[in-house]
Amino acid sequence: MGNNNPLIVEVTRGDMIESRHRGDCVVVDRTGAVVHAWGDGERQIYPRSAIKPLQALALVETGAADAYRISDAELALAAASHSATQGHVDAVAGWLERVGLAESDLECAGHDPMHRDADKALIRVDQTPGPLHNNCSGKHAGFLTTALHMGEPTKGYLAASHPVQQRLLAILSDMGGVDLSGTPRGVDGCGIPVIGMPLAAMAVALARMADPQDLDIRRAEAARRILAAMVNHPNMVAGPGRFDTIAMTAGRGAFVIKTGAEGVYAGILPGLGLGVALKIDDGAKRAAEVAMAAVLKHLGVVDGEAETALKDFLCAPILNAAGVRVGDIRMADGWAG
């Protein structure tokens, strides 16, 4: 059911609400029928890394994954925003080596690892992060593997005109049921094009992964394999201490979630056949995680055990420098309608 009111996430300190974050969210089935909505489901957003599961479809449906013996853990990395732990970095490096490529073939730049221990380890040995440490390096390994399999250039795959990116644009359009040819364009943090997309169309694309019965056989199988890989290897999708990994571990297959920059979140619920697309207006990660956890609970896919595991996301503690809890990040009362 629709709700014109946006999601409101409150940040408290002591007796007062100190800050508020606003956002929009839509939950749909594969036909686009709205099951729940808060705010403006037709607003255009850049989906950012939240749509990596959709972007990974090409790796499987082209036959590249089978041709190069891509493992389930590597499929999860193709849909990941990983933390650059040693396990993540070694897995991407091993993947590239097996297909005859190297770190230098990755066109994503390096950045500091998301995992603090991994970041400190590089500092201790005075090593500059390279492309393998980029949280998107698994996705880029998937792009390169697909290009190899299709006989396409591996150089310049970031360009919007490259077959890799044209293929992804077609997938987003097809899965979302919307013409994206005239929507806004930008450049993502890892260098690939970002495509403006209505929030509701993003949700439809995710719902069609959750319930792929209307897709052709090859794409339907690709969707199932990618979701299974993410469920079975949640640590590859994000990393220690991160919401995506904690939630999917606790959810035990009830849902797949994927974060994106600037307060975007994707949810795929295979058991219910639903897709969830969420965007926080000010881009706050802290609000997006709390809102996504609340929506999952509202949809009934967070049971008692999972709720316990997610308690610090359903109501995230604000700690002072001494580690004392002085406030919370929470949904506003009555948010669910």
Image (cartoon, rainbow, N blue to C red):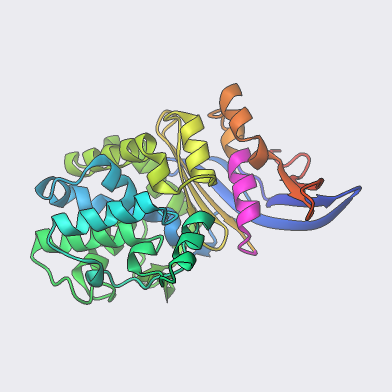
Q: Is residue 287 above or below residue 192?
A: above
* Residue 210 lies in quadrant: top left
Q: Nearer the viewer, residue 176 or 89?
A: 89
Q: Give residue 324's position: percent from left, percent from top.
A: 81, 46
The C terminus lies in which quarter of the figure? top right
Q: Give residue 212's position: percent from left, percent from top.
A: 30, 38
Residue at the (8%, 65%) spot, across then down = 151
Furthest toward the front, the residue is 125
Q: Give residue 234's position: percent from left, percent from top.
A: 41, 40
Q: Nearer the viewer, residue 242 or 223?
A: 242
Q: Give residue 252's position: percent from left, percent from top.
A: 44, 28
Residue 178 belongs to magenta span: no
Residue at the (35%, 49%) spot, across then down = 87
Residue at the (38%, 49%) spot, across then down = 205
Q: Which residues are magenta?
A: 282-294
Q: In the rendered view, does 251 fall on the left or right side of 132?
A: right
Residue at the (61%, 35%) spot, across then down = 310
Report the predominant secondary structure element of the magenta stretch. Answer: helix
Q: How many marks?
A: 0
Furthest toward the right, the residue is 15
Q: Nearer the viewer, residue 247 or 202?
A: 247
* Residue 313 lies in quadrant: top right
* Residue 152 lies in quadrant: bottom left
- The reply to whether residue 34 is visible in this rendering is no
Q: Is residue 200 above or below residue 207?
A: below
Q: In the rendered view, does 161 fall on the left or right side of 276?
A: left
Residue 283 belongs to magenta span: yes
- The reply to whether residue 12 is visible in this rendering is yes
Q: In the rendered view, does 243 fall on the left or right side of 254?
A: right
Furthest toward the top, the residue is 304
